[in-house]
Image (tube, rainbow, N blue to C red):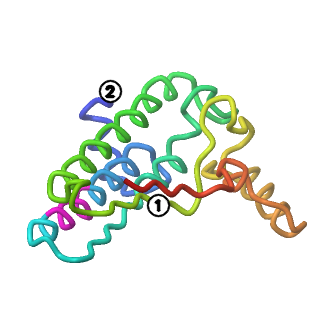
């Protein structure tokens, strides 16, 4: 849990995705905005409804470095605080999807959940410097990797396969 003082500092500093607290605040606001608007549209039962949810991707880029095993640049005390936000976020998204299914029962609609890639979690994820690491060493490593035709570490954290789920 993040203390109110830390939350207020993050909001005042306005560092966005460079700060796990401000970044998560933005992810939650965007998730509620997109899904809330989608639910309002769903109430009219349109023939086709598509809702974009960026948060399931950005939560990984923002907080995966804190999830066990944490990456090398992460303070273990911070990891203990921020790691819990990831499963809580995905449980919230699951509840939102359930609310859409209330408007579109599977007996009446085809529901597709898609993504452009998966994300490596736990032991599958590289534990070197993350793609969100801030500092000259991380920036130089990423730049050198790109110049050499390789992949920056954020690509190493992504799974090549996308996801397609139908119901």
Helix, strand or loop for disc 2: loop
- Is residue 37 rendered magenta in the image? yes
**Residue 8 on the magenta span:** no
Residue 114 is labelled as 1
Q: Inspect this view and state whether residue 149 appears.
A: yes
Relative depth, front residue between 50 and 7: 50
Q: Residue at x 67, y 47 (%)?
A: 157
How far across and down, in percent of the image, does residue 115 sit? Answer: 50, 60
Please tell me which residue lies in front, 165 or 119. Answer: 165
Q: Position of residue 25 (x, y in %)?
A: 31, 49
Q: In the displayed image of the protein, which residue is found farthest to the left?
A: 44
The relative height of residue 33 versus residue 127 in the rendered view (above or below) is below
- Quadrant (top left, top right, bottom left, bottom right) of the N terminus: top left
Q: Is residue 107 left or right of residue 145?
A: left
Residue 152, horizontal then vertical, whole percent: 75, 58
Q: Residue at x 30, y 52 (%)?
A: 12
The local secondary structure at tag 1 comes to strand
Q: CA distance from mark 2 to mark 1?
A: 31 Å
State the extent of the magenta-drawn residues as a range: 32-39
| Magenta region, main secondary structure | helix
Q: Earlier in the sequence, mark 2 or mark 1?
A: 2
Residue at which label 2 appears:
1
Residue 6 higher or lower than 17, as above or below: above
**On screen, residue 45 above or below 13:** below
Question: Which is more toward the observer, 110 or 79?
Answer: 110
User: Are there few (<14), some (14-19), or many (20+) residues within 10 Å of tag 2?
Assistant: few
In the rendered view, does 162 fall on the left or right side of 47?
right
């Amino acid at each position: 849990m993040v203390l109110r003082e830390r939350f207020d500092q993050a909001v005042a500093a306005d560092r966005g995705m460079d700060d796990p607290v401000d970044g998560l605040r933005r992810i939650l606001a965007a998730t509620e905005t997109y899904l809330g608007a989608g639910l309002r549209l769903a109430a009219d039962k349109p023939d086709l409804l598509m809702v974009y949810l960026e948060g399931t991707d950005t939560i990984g880029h923002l907080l995966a470095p804190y999830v066990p095993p944490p990456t090398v640049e992460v303070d273990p005390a911070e990891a203990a605080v921020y790691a819990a936000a990831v499963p809580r976020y995905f449980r919230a998204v699951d509840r939102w999807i359930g609310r859409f299914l209330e408007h579109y029962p599977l007996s009446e609609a085809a529901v597709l959940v898609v993504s452009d890639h998966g994300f490596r979690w736990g032991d599958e994820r590289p534990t070197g410097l993350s793609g969100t690491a801030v500092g000259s060493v991380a920036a130089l490593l990423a730049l050198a990797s790109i110049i050499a035709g390789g992949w920056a570490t954020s690509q190493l954290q992504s799974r090549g396969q996308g996801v397609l789920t139908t119901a």
